Image (cartoon, rainbow, N blue to C red):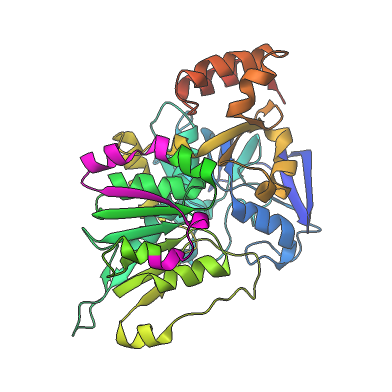
Amino acid sequence: MKTKAVRIYGKRDLRLEEFELPPLKDDEILAQIVSDSICMSSHKAALQGADHKRVPDDVHENPTIIGHEFAGVILEVGRKWQHKFSPGQKFSIQPAMAHMGTLDAPGYSYRYIGGDATHVIIPGIVMEADCLLPYDGEAFFPASLSEPMSCIVGAFHASYHVPPGTYKHEMGIREGGMMAILAGTGPMGLGAIDYALHGGRKPSLLVVTDIDEKRLARAACLFTPESAMKEGVKLVYVNTGKTDNPAAFLRNLTGGKGFDDVFVFAPVRQVVEQADAILGFDGCLNFFAGPTDTAFSASLNFYNVHYAFTHITGTSGGNTDDMRESLRLMGEGKINPAVMITHVGGLDSVIDTTLNLPQIPGGKKLIYTNISMPLVSLYRLEEMGKTDPLFRGLHEIVSRNDYIWNLEAERYLLANARPI
């Protein structure tokens, strides 16, 4: 079977190509990809090429398929897995298989599996790692977004606190504590707000900061302080660009005590140092946003590490349990990762989008891999619909839903877009 896929050959060298998939082995599964959301990690891999920890050294000779936040449909199952999987099943994949003793991951390391493809072969290691997850939802995009949501879930679980006089690490954010999400109105920040309000363990105070007034306004519309109060959480949005002393202002919101949990959603030195400055006793700083600069550093108050027992942690992705939790919360209607999505596009928009991701404003960029379409902001559909009936129809759907992507929009797009 032929597939079309975006493959990486080296630094900033991505190519959309059609090629033949090899015959299916007994321990493999053939699948059609339907959706993939583009992650900053893919952007970093595209910039670093073989220098990236997950990209093979010989990628210039044996290119790999990029994209690791994907969902699709199983087409054919090798004999070894026929007791567990069957054609027609929807699925998502947890790409992080570190517990198997490898950094290799779909979307970085493999020649025949990655999210930015029409068809893939899922290798046996994915099933051995229990990282092929059946998905029963109607729409595909939530399954794609379960991977980034699992990163958020994992980060919340990785935070920790140590009761005074003990050496017991109590994992997770502090129940009923005070939490801050700094630079928190990007796509992953929105997911973190959603999880903080609707996950199992909630803070009593949640402060979300940014310096972009438009992004703060959008976040405040999606997650209003009034709706947060119904969840038992006092939600406060702060534009730290408009305060003379952001750290002092934020600490005052806690009555001067400081925060129990502080999440950093931008790899910016000033933001990291601000997070350190607002930690309270036994507070945990969670450095969520991975930098591209391998020498990135920031000052840390070691006096407080010693006397105030402050902690620092960071995670790089979630695990399979985190992904299952994400899928469960979506299925129960408790979280809605669609709020992350601001753009949609086809497979032929992947290269430009991946290479230029930091310069494209908005949230998550969702790709439907079997169609041809430029990357389009949901807020520009009306304008583009003046000359294209496809976009006109999409605008009618998303505008009825506060410009949030949804099942109806996905079905309309898949039924009416031009196949690639």
Residue at 66% across, 38% down: 117
Residue 20 on image: x %, y %: 75, 39
Residue 294 on image: x %, y %: 64, 72
Can you say whether 19 is above or below 410 in the image? below
Is 142 on the left-hand or right-hand side of 416?
left
Quarter of the figure with the N terminus: top right
Is 151 on the left-hand or right-hand side of 416?
left
Residue 26 on image: x %, y %: 55, 46
Outermost residue, front direction? 244
How many labels, in total?
A: 0
Is 17 on the left-hand or right-hand side of 309?
right
Q: What range of the chain is rendered magenta? A: 220-248
Can you say whether 239 is above or below 383 in the image? below
Front one among 418 and 131: 418
Residue at 30% across, 82% down: 308
Residue 121 on image: x %, y %: 61, 43
Quarter of the figure with the C terminus: top right
Residue 123 visible? The answer is yes
Residue at 70% across, 27% down: 373
Can you say whether 31 is above or below 242 in the image? above
Q: Is residue 134 magenta?
A: no
Q: Which quadrant holds residue 38?
A: top right
Can you say whether 304 is above or below 312 in the image? below
Front one among 258 and 174: 258
Residue at 52% across, 61% down: 289
Residue 158 visible? The answer is no
Q: Is residue 238 magenta?
A: yes
